[in-house]
Image: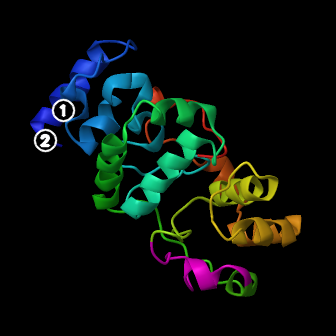
Amino acid sequence: MPKSASFLLLAAILGGCADAGGGNPAFTASGEVIALSGGDGGPTHACASCHGLKGEGDGRLVPRLAGLDAGYLHRQLDDYANGRREHAEMRAIVRGLDLDDRGKVSAYYATLPATASALPRVSPLYAARCAACHGPTGEGLGPANPPLAGQSAAYVEAQLLAWRTGKRRGDGMGQMLAVSRALEPAEVENLAGLHHAGRAEASPAHPRHRRAPAASR
């Protein structure tokens, strides 16, 4: 981590949970600074406090951001702001970032290496329902179709349920709504690749600063 980013993060932490303050450009100087310090929203808005210092997620309901397409990440931030994705905490955080800030932090996470194991989804059901958009092994196909491999089973399951219930929207053609509503509960588990032991044993990347996980990030 560059010394400048480390200094800003330390300053934010020492400042407690108050706002970092008033449009100071030092707190939005780069995507890394925004991710680690929370920008003008202060440390309570820091992406790293939930998504991990390396964007790795928590192995359960908070997804990895590292290595995802910058355009995809930017669109998700916009969707939180305009309500296409329902998540009160994320909406409050994102609405404190202007379009330039959202672009910076999206580009930062896109440059980070994926830290989660990229477990492929290669079941017959996945091949029939998902592979055309998300790739044969869940590797993703461009900004409109993010990777599923490397995301936790619990997160994939939660997102399928969010699409199914309309808590997540914004795919344009309505494909995710149609696919998710056509699935039986057992098929959702099959697609997510759920392993109950993995779900129980998963641990946060840095629990001291972890906020409570939420299902629809």
Q: Position of residue 191 (x, y in %)?
A: 72, 71
Say the numbered circle drawn on residue 2. Answer: 2
For residue 138: magenta?
yes
Give the magenta part as a residue range.
Answer: 129-142
Q: Secondary structure at mark 1?
A: helix
* Residue at x 29% of width, y 12% of height: 15
Q: How is the image coloured?
A: rainbow
Q: Position of residue 38 (x, y in %)?
A: 35, 30
Q: Position of residue 35 (x, y in %)?
A: 34, 39
The image shows residue 86, relative to residue 183, as above or below, that is above
Q: Which of 126/86 is in front?
A: 86
* Residue at x 54% of width, y 36% of height: 90
Q: Main secondary structure of the magenta part?
A: loop
Amino acid on which disc 2 is placed: Pro
Rate crowding at label 1 as few (under 14), some (14 to 19) or many (20 or more) other CA atoms within 10 Å.
Answer: some
* Residue at x 33% of width, y 46% of height: 105
The answer to which image quadrant residue 184 occupies is bottom right
The answer to which image quadrant residue 189 occupies is bottom right
Where is the N terminus found, in terms of image quarters? top left
